[in-house]
């Protein structure tokens, strides 16, 4: 019943807060790593960040609780991948500590929001 309510109150994926925040993280990741000379690292972290928002959108558009939940788990996994890449970026001195903290906080918040959506869909 709660999942039905979710689909009734959210008309399009652009209304989903976790998608909005994931978009902000993606823009920040692209800007921060735009000049990174390690192309494979840059490509991987940028693609992982895009994957968060795209999986939320794709899952919602399928209009099925089961599919939406599956894609939310994929988005949550991509969020973890971004955090892992950020940890590596900090160790390799690709980002300073304040940038690292800012991006990590964003990704943790997004992960928690996604977990909340998953919890709703599991009822």
Image: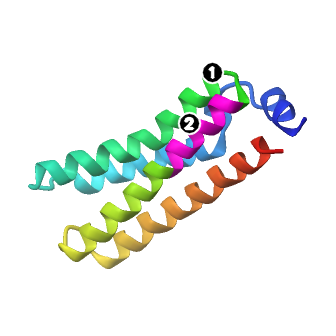
Q: Specify the segment rendered in magenta.
A: 66-76
User: Is label 2 in contact with label 1 (beta carbons under 8 Å)?
Assistant: yes
* Image height of 104 relative to 110, above or below: below
Q: CA distance from mark 2 to mark 1?
A: 10 Å
Task: Say whether residue 16 is left or right of residue 35.
Answer: right
Residue at figure coordinates x 31%, y 61% from the top left: 85
Q: What residue is shown with label 2?
A: 71
Task: Say whether residue 88 is left or right of residue 73.
Answer: left
Q: State the residue in front, 40 or 66.
A: 66
Where residue 63 appears, x then y in whole percent?
69, 22
Report the quarter where the C terminus lies: top right
* Image height of 102 relative to 14, above or below: below
Q: State the residue in front, 105 or 1.
A: 1
Task: Say whether residue 63 is left or right of residue 52.
Answer: right
Q: What residue is shown with label 1?
A: 62
Where residue 38 appears, x then y in whole percent?
11, 55
| Residue that protrudes farthest toward the right in the picture | 1
For the residue labelled by badge 2, is the local secondary structure a helix, a strand or a loop?
Answer: helix
Report the number of discs.
2
Q: Which mark is residue 24?
A: none
């Amino acid at each position: 019943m709660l999942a039905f309510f979710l689909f009734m109150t959210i008309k399009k994926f652009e209304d989903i807060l976790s998608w909005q925040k994931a978009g902000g993280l993606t823009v920040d990741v692209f800007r921060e790593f735009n000049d990174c000379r390690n192309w494979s690292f840059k490509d991987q972290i940028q693609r992982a960040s895009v994957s968060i928002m795209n999986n939320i959108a794709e899952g919602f558009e399928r209009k099925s609780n089961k599919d939406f939940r599956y894609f939310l788990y994929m988005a949550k996994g991509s969020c973890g991948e971004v955090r892992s890449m950020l940890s590596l970026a900090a160790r390799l001195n690709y980002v300073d500590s304040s940038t690292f903290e800012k991006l990590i906080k964003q990704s943790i918040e997004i992960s928690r929001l996604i977990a909340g959506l998953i919890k709703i869909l599991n009822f």
